Amino acid sequence: GVLKERLMNKIVVGFADVETAHHVVREAVDLAHRLGASLHVVTAVSEDATTTVDIGSDYWVLSSTDLAEEGIGNLMRKLTHSVDYTVAVHEGKPADVLVEEAERVGADLIMVGNVRMQGPSRLLGSVGGAVAHHAPCSVLIVKST
């Protein structure tokens, strides 16, 4: 109904190819599925470097962006629920990239994990803390550890 539409149409979630981040993405997919929201999966790379992959006599040149997009696609295919989602891969610090993408897509919610967020002294320096301070929308900290 109206409340659902006003609360959340687009959820932004950060992705990294580690289990704790996979957990956050799974939680985001579950929430998006329940609310009928779309998901915008965002990852940050330090630079868009290229890697050459040899398989037999064939080789491919893959960029950091290609590898990140492949990792996101692989994870999304394994999940129980299917939701509409988009992907963005940008160079930069994870917190900055998440906030910028949330602003760009008009996100209603950003979901991040609680990794390295134990204790008040660490909170401000963590990705979740930085996102919470600068986000254009609500932030949900998912217990991922």
Image: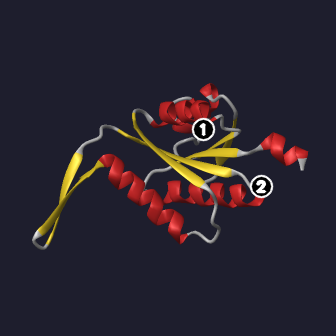
Choose between 21 and 106: the one closer to the eye.
106
Residue at the spot of label 2: 35
Image coordinates for residue 110, horizontal then vertical, percent = 64, 41
Amino acid type assigned to the residue bearing label 2 in the image: Leu
Q: Residue at x 71, y 60 (%)?
A: 33
| Residue 138 located left or right of residue 128 | right
The answer for how far apart the CA atoms under marks 2 and 1 are is 32 Å
Amino acid type assigned to the residue bearing label 1 in the image: Gly
Image coordinates for residue 100, horizontal then vertical, percent = 53, 30
In this rendering, the answer to whether 85 lies above or below 124 is below
Residue at the spot of label 1: 119
| Residue 88 located left or right of residue 58 | right
Picture disc at residue 97: none
Q: Residue at x 60, y 30 (%)?
A: 103
**Which corner quadrant of the image does residue 83 belong to?**
bottom right
In this rendering, the answer to whether 86 lies above or below 6 is below
Q: Residue furthest top?
A: 134
**Which corner quadrant of the image does residue 101 belong to?**
top right
Q: Are marks 2 and 1 in contact (CB under 8 Å)?
A: no
Q: Residues within 10 Å of mark 2 (few under 14, many from 20)?
A: some
Q: Determine whether the residue tagged by mark 1 lies in a helix, strand or loop.
A: loop
| 2 or 1: mark nearer the eye | 2
Q: Residues within 10 Å of mark 1 (few under 14, many from 20)?
A: few
**Which corner quadrant of the image does residue 119 belong to?**
top right
Q: Determine whether the residue tagged by mark 2 lies in a helix, strand or loop.
A: helix
* Badge 2 or badge 1: first in the primary sequence: 2
Image coordinates for residue 2, horizontal then vertical, percent = 89, 45
Q: Residue at x 14, y 68 (%)?
A: 58
